[in-house]
Image (cartoon, grey):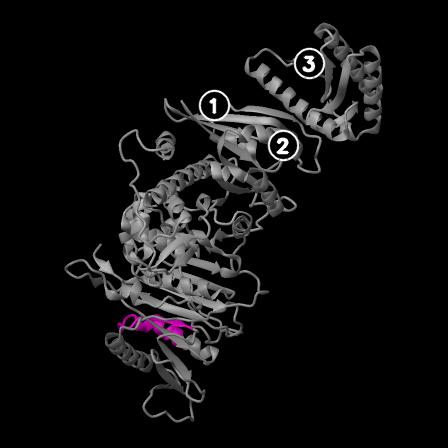
Amino acid sequence: MTEQVSAHKDPVVIAFANEVLDGFSDVCRSLRYATFLTDDGFEVASIAGDEKQNRRVASMASSMQALGDAVAKDLRIGGAEYIIIAAETGYVIQMRVPEHAMVLAAHFDAAETVGKALSVVRLAASNMRTLVRDKAA
Amino acid sequence: MAEHVILFAGPMGAGKTTAIESLSEIETIRTEATNTDRETADKDTTTVALDYGEITVSDEDKVRLYGVPGQRRFNFMWTILKERAVGLILLVNNDAADPIEELDAFLEEFGELHEKGGIVVCVTRSDVAPTPYLDKYAERIREVMPGRMIPVFTADARNADQMRTALMSLIANIEMTAMIAGNQERAA
Amino acid sequence: MGFVTKARHSLGLVGLSPIECAKIATFIESEAEDAGCPWLVLHSDSCDALIVPSDVEFSADPYQVLIRLVRFGNQPIDGELCITTPLSAAELINILKKAQDNLSTRSRSNDVAPMKVKMEDWGAVPANDRHHVPAGFGTPTPHHMTNGSAALKTEAWPVTADGSPHPATQPSAMHAPVQQPHPVAPPQPVTANASHGDAHEFSAAWDQIAVALYSIVQNSAPAVAEIRVENLDMIRIDFRFRAYNSRIPLEQVAANGSRIAIRSTLVEAFRPPIVNLPGESLDKLFWFIGSQAFHGTGAPWLKPEDRYRLRRWPNFTELNHAVADMRAAAAIGNCFLNAAELASAAGISVESATRTLNAYSLMGLLEIQTDKTAAPATFKPPAQKEGGGGLFSKLRTKLGL
């Protein structure tokens, strides 16, 4: 998992992220917002949202991911795979891109089922992993 | 149980996580991520949510030590954590591009904690960068927070004795300020 | 504590050649002490006594004794104390005794402070006997500059039956040299409690070192200095960098030495440092000396009627401090206090509070409030009961401090 250039500064990775997010929104109409971010809270790419909000969500998602990891570590239950925040009018799912220091955070409205949302998030994260891995190869 | 929340703030790379590790009697909880911002601080990882350590003082008292991320993009964590804090240990690395400006920025964000309790400034990495001297920091504090007495020390965050000195000084200052205020009220 | 500091006079050398200065410094270091008239030599024009060439127009202040140096071919001036060239130790000691008598008479008659110093820049300065080579004698290049020197004698004066100290040790007895000086000195770190217990071991010679240091710092001109203690320990100070070097830790420096010498000089700012930088912080040295000197009485430049407040906290992480020092700093950092009030607020003895004030003032950390109309500050003493008190006390116990 050694990346020569940080993901949020790598145009190729940013292009991959945009590509994945475009496909993501196509398969899930209840998606309100999504962003790829680095583990340390930099926005790589987003759909919807304004620039300021995207940066802020990236930071917050990074913190939550780290807190989730800290809890999982403390409880000795392995690494945190994903985090779900359920609210009255929607929920947020965030998931690490396997093998990379990146996280996908997505906001869905309440019309979506958690199961489906989780599936599409997992798919998007997996697609991102494949693209970045192929690029590295 | 009375909880005393002490916050550790300061720019990225100032030594907040290490300082809490030096003081905590439990294994510290860390939320670190791979650091992709090498221009700001050349280190492998960076705190992105919080660090946590604690000292159980007695059956009734526990000191909770929270470290906040240094980068401004995590300032939502600053807001969350300073709600409960009664004191701040502000670490500033002397080898920063402009450490006095860093001091300014963090005092602006966390200066209110002086009113809630107290603040101590620890200048780290002065072995690497001897200047600015402590007087500069003290002078700047007097300018931006006139009338407040904020202790300023050089410190090595890895040195438990030094960090204890900072913590004890913070608490001494908080208690003394309260005592003096109490005396003044009685006198009035 | 059975001793107090003996009063001492300062001797200013004005307009003398480097060789004359070096000779006088050497004579005083080697013989004045044995002759019972220890003097602190400075290149200053506001000392208690001044040696000035007879061909130089100079008017001394009323509190000063003027000694004229009559060089070969010049005529002594009637009615003035004079010494002649070539300088001899015997003549110098003799004239200094007369000056001392003169000053003692004045002091008794008008209660004038006995020691007063002020420093001025003399530019190029004479070499000195850093390695016990008589300064100015065959030393071609002044590799080290010395503007002041002193042979400091631990002359213990018994306290009076009621334990009151010698008047010269009272803060009111000395003018605060809010002026400037040269010479430097060494001391030992202090702390409100722990280190103060050994304070009685500190010889009175260190008091004069403290005075000299205070004067130099007040001057704020670029200066360097060396302090030599009788066991050959040496402390080298460069005030420009607020740093010092010592061959041994301060705690091991002979605290009760009877022969301690200070030499100092002004230097140009561009000269290389005389210490290996970064060296040790000068505050560490000042803390050590300031809190040990004066045997628990106020430093002569402090006035008991004044109150003091910290300008900034001492850098405790580099000082040999006790936990009580933090409380003391917290108290005097937040309001103006005198020694008694500080003792009350911090829960320490008045003597410890006085030592703390001495150290802080030497370190240049104090603001002064001279408003005598301010109401005395009273404090509810800190809780003493076991297990009681605030978080500070509990944490102190917890951390085993």
| Residue at point 34%, 56% (across, down) | C374
Q: Crowding at label 1, few (<14), some or many (≥20) Cα neighbours within 10 Å?
A: few
Q: Which residues are magenta?
A: C24-42
- Return the residue at label 2: B75
Q: Position of residue B143 (x, y in %)?
A: 55, 51
* Any part of residue B19 in sight: no
Q: Quadrant of residue C131?
A: bottom left
Q: Quadrant of residue C357?
A: bottom left
Q: Position of residue C15 (x, y in %)?
A: 46, 81
- Return the residue at label 1: B26
Query: Relative to A61, is C357 on the left or the right?
Result: left
Mark 3 residue element: loop
The answer to whether residue C216 is above or below residue A122 is: below
Which chain is indicated by disc 3?
A: A
| Residue at point 30%, 65% (across, down) | C172
Q: Is residue C31 magenta?
A: yes
Q: Identity of the amino acid at label 3?
A: Thr
Estimate the spatial distance between the alpha carbons at disc 3 and disc 2, rounded to whole Å. 26 Å
Which chain is indicated by disc 1?
A: B
Mark 1 residue element: loop
Q: Identity of the amino acid at label 2?
A: Asn
Estimate the spatial distance between the alpha carbons at disc 3 and disc 1, rounded to whole Å. 39 Å
Residue at the outermost left position = C161
Observer-nearest of C369 and A44: C369
